[in-house]
Image: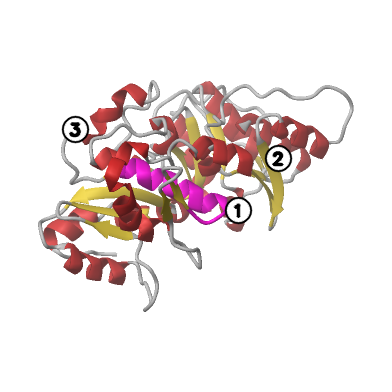
Amino acid sequence: LADLCLVLSQLTTVPIEVELISLDAAAIRVNDPLATPAGWMSASQWIEQSLAAMGMSIAVVDDRLLVSASPEKVTDGTREALTMDDFGDDAAEVVQWISPLVLADDDPPPSWNASTRRIEVADHLAARMRAALVLDAVRMIRGKTPKMERWRSRRWMGPGPLAPAGLDQVVQERVAPGAEGQGVFAEWPLVGDGPSGPRLDSPRTAAGLVRSIAAENGAVVLVAWHDSMRLGLYPNDLMMPWNDSRPAGALLDDLLGEFGIQARVCGENVWWVGSEASYDRLEVITWVSIPPQSGESIRSRLTQALGLQEGQVLPFAVDDHNLLIRCPRYIARQLARLVSKGNLQP
């Protein structure tokens, strides 16, 4: 899927972006083989039919095409996670506790359906994905086994730097091979060492170059084209970076750095290309241990740090021992300082 989108972006000059979080929610891997239809047809028909067979759709969004999982596929992929039979008599209380993290905009608050033993959320995909990730976070906090495989949630959810040591080990058996080394709340490190391929003897397109470098490392690339084009990088821009057996990370920095763009490893042999600012604004769900009776003071500091106006809901929940929050990565990265020192630097 990732390769197909890059190749078509290069051939048609129309940027095709993949919404990774919806594919994770639907349990669709971007680097799995993709069956494509045979016969003569337009590029749009070809990709639409290829995506439909895997439970995905494509839509025009601003100046690009966006590939995402279909509503039916996301519903199927999150159904088990939204079933709260494993919480027993505490289910209704848990739904009320996590409500601020699931809410967004003018959504109705989530509710507990005792007859189906499920949480009921607003009828759109974002609410369903948030609820699934938050509930699995609560399961991990309470020592239960998450219902979503960790390769699907690790990019977006995980314990913060003050979480009890070893908490994430309760689900090691569900972690995808090769994904164990990812850090707290799923940081995506910059691409570093690795082969970068042969020297270039002629210019190549940006889309083709990042795809070939990733292929040398057994990875696939997802480009945030809305970000990259804003900074001046387009799929069919011709480039010829100097390559003298330099590591993949150094070559990509030469290729992308002048635009303020980075290549990051987001697990499952997938690379993400976009700006550091956009990366830092991506939301994650994370938690840390907190001192008893400190919830209200932390709430006040978080409200200020996130710049929330009066009446806006803080996506945050606390009990006597834990703080659970949905926030941008740059805030999540500083939770340890917030909790232990009582201050937060921007």
Say left or right for 231 vs 151.
right
Looking at the rendered image, the quarter that the N terminus falls into is top right
Q: Which residues are magenta?
A: 121-138
**Label 1 packing within 10 angstroms: few (<14), some (14-19), many (20+):** many
**Which structural element holds mark 2?**
helix
Question: Dot 1: what SS?
Answer: helix
> Dot 1 corresponds to which residue?
226
Q: Quadrant of residue 103?
A: bottom left
Could you tell which of marks 2 and 1 lies nearer the N-terminus?
A: 2
Which comes before the other along the chain, label 3 or label 1? 3
Q: CA distance from mark 3 to mark 2?
A: 43 Å
Please indicate whether residue 131 sits to the left or right of residue 182 in the image. right
Which residue does the image show at 30% across and 40% down from the upper left? 88
Disc 3 secondary structure class: loop
In the image: residue 107, left or right of residue 320? right
The residue carrying mark 3 is: 166
For badge 3, the amino acid type reads Gly
Task: Say whether residue 256 is visible.
Answer: yes
Q: Residue at x 80, y 39 (%)?
A: 44
In the rendered image, which residue does mark 2 sit on? 9
Q: Which residue is nearer to you in this view: 102 or 194?
A: 102
Horizontal and vertical percent for residue 101? 37, 57
Amino acid marked by disc 2 = Ser
**The C terminus - image quarter:** bottom left
